């Protein structure tokens, strides 16, 4: 939490006035004044997103257009593959892929979404990392690409089983879109970029809209009785139930894709023996771990009782062990499950589902069972 005297330095998203008008409780987050909850409260916001549709302001995220100076999108894709272990060349037009920027030690500088818009790539990066990500792109790709930060755009996320129906009422042609489809689409008469994706485990959409139109579009969406505004509190509990990583908590510069259980995101073409294996920072370590395994692994954790186990709690192999084996990186109460859930890192031999480990909470050792993620089945439209 920022000190009171620095609150005036916080940035505002284009929806800041709307948040205040709707009674949001605001908190500092990634340098922005952001809504943590509204009048309904975190529990109701969470459950409403699971049953109907929730609207999230994610305009603090970074939006970047990456264009090859040759004019060919495949050249931009080849260039970006120098910085990420994912196959970007294979991303078809109007599709997107989850990726990570890696460092020379195999750690993660950030995770991001990469979309193919036909003539250029469209990147969405995390708010806390976007300045460093831009500098990283400029330092390594400026010779072959132009890097345009799209500061004049806002980003909304409409998540939940009724999201498609809500957008249809506003004239958005999204019914044929599948999970990770993306591209330009008008919504309520505004020129938007729409992707069928999100951060909740639910079917839903992320909508990039010109900042000047953001409040008008958000208001139209919120006029639908199936839509509630959702703050950071429910966003965090939703993504935790979905088993999704939060950068700076579950993943950071000290974690590799294999340690973070993100092997699925690295395609065969970039692995040893693949057509374009390696060539990204930390490739030697990452590819070795993908082949042979890492010594630790991110896992889901379920408490036997009702007490949530929070981020930072140390993990032990048994109730009397002196030395910790890992720690919890995300934890809280899962409203959909009516039970606490957590994620953390344990040695790989203890990562099997059903293994019991212990968390130290207020001087006591609480048993936790290693569990499969997601905790709540996802409902993506495949």
Image (cartoon, grey):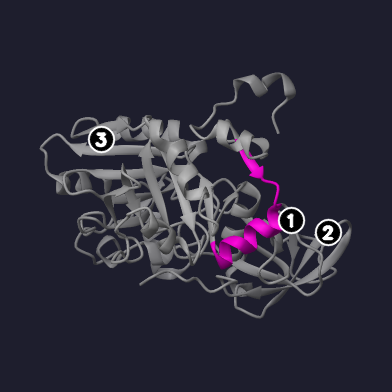
State the quadrant of the C terminus.
bottom left
| Mark closer to the chain start, 1 or 3 | 3
Does the magenta segment cover residue 327? no
| Mark closer to the chain start, 3 or 2 | 3
User: Dot 2 corresponds to which residue?
Assistant: 361
Closer-to-camera residue (121/357): 121
Q: Can residue 96 be seen here? A: yes
Whether the residues at callouts 1 and 2 have beta carbons within 8 Å, the answer is: yes
Q: Nearer the viewer, mark 1 or mark 3?
A: 1
Span shown in magenta: 34-52
Q: Is residue 270 left or right of residue 211?
A: left
SS class, disc 3: helix
Q: Is residue 359 left or right of residue 76?
A: right
User: Dot 1 corresponds to which residue?
Assistant: 310
Does the magenta segment cover residue 45? yes
Q: CA distance from mark 1 to mark 3?
A: 39 Å
User: Dot 3 corresponds to which residue?
Assistant: 141
Q: In the image, residue 87 lies at what x, y percent?
A: 27, 58
């Amino acid at each position: 939490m920022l000190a009171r005297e620095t609150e005036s330095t916080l940035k505002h998203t284009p929806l800041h006035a709307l948040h205040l008008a709707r009674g949001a409780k605001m908190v500092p987050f990634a340098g922005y004044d952001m809504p943590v909850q509204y009048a309904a409260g975190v529990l109701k916001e969470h459950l409403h997103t699971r049953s109907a549709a929730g609207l999230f302001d994610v305009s603090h995220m970074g939006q970047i257009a990456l264009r090859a100076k040759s004019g060919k999108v495949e050249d931009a894709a080849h260039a970006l593959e120098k910085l990420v272990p994912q196959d970007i060349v294979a991303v078809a037009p109007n599709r997107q892929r989850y990726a990570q920027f890696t460092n020379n030690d195999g750690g993660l500088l950030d995770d991001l979404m990469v979309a193919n818009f036909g003539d250029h790539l469209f990147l969405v990066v995390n708010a806390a990392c976007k300045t460093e990500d831009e500098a990283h792109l400029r330092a390594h790709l400026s010779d072959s690409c132009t890097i345009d930060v799209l500061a004049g755009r806002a980003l909304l996320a409409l998540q939940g089983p009724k999201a498609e129906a809500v957008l249809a009422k506003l004239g958005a042609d999204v019914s044929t879109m599948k999970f990770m489809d993306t591209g330009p689409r008008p919504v309520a008469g505004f020129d938007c970029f729409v992707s069928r994706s999100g951060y909740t485990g639910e079917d839903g959409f992320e909508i990039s809209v010109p900042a000047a139109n953001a409040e008008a579009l958000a208001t139209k969406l919120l006029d639908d009785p199936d839509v509630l505004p959702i703050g950071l509190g429910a966003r965090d509990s939703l993504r935790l139930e979905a088993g999704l990583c939060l950068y700076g908590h579950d993943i950071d510069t000290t974690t590799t894709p294999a340690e973070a259980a993100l092997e699925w995101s690295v395609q065969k073409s970039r692995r040893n023996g693949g057509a374009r294996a390696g060539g990204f920072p930390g490739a030697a370590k990452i590819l070795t771990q993908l082949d042979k395994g890492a010594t630790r692994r991110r896992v889901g954790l379920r408490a036997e009782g009702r007490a949530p186990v929070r981020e930072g709690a140390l993990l032990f192999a048994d109730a009397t062990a002196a030395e910790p084996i890992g720690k919890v990186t995300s934890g809280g109460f899962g409203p959909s499950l009516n039970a606490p859930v957590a994620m953390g890192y344990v040695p790989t031999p203890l990562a099997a589902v059903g293994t019991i480990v212990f968390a130290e909470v207020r001087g006591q050792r609480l048993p936790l069972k290693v569990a499969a993620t997601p905790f709540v089945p996802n409902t993506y439209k495949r």
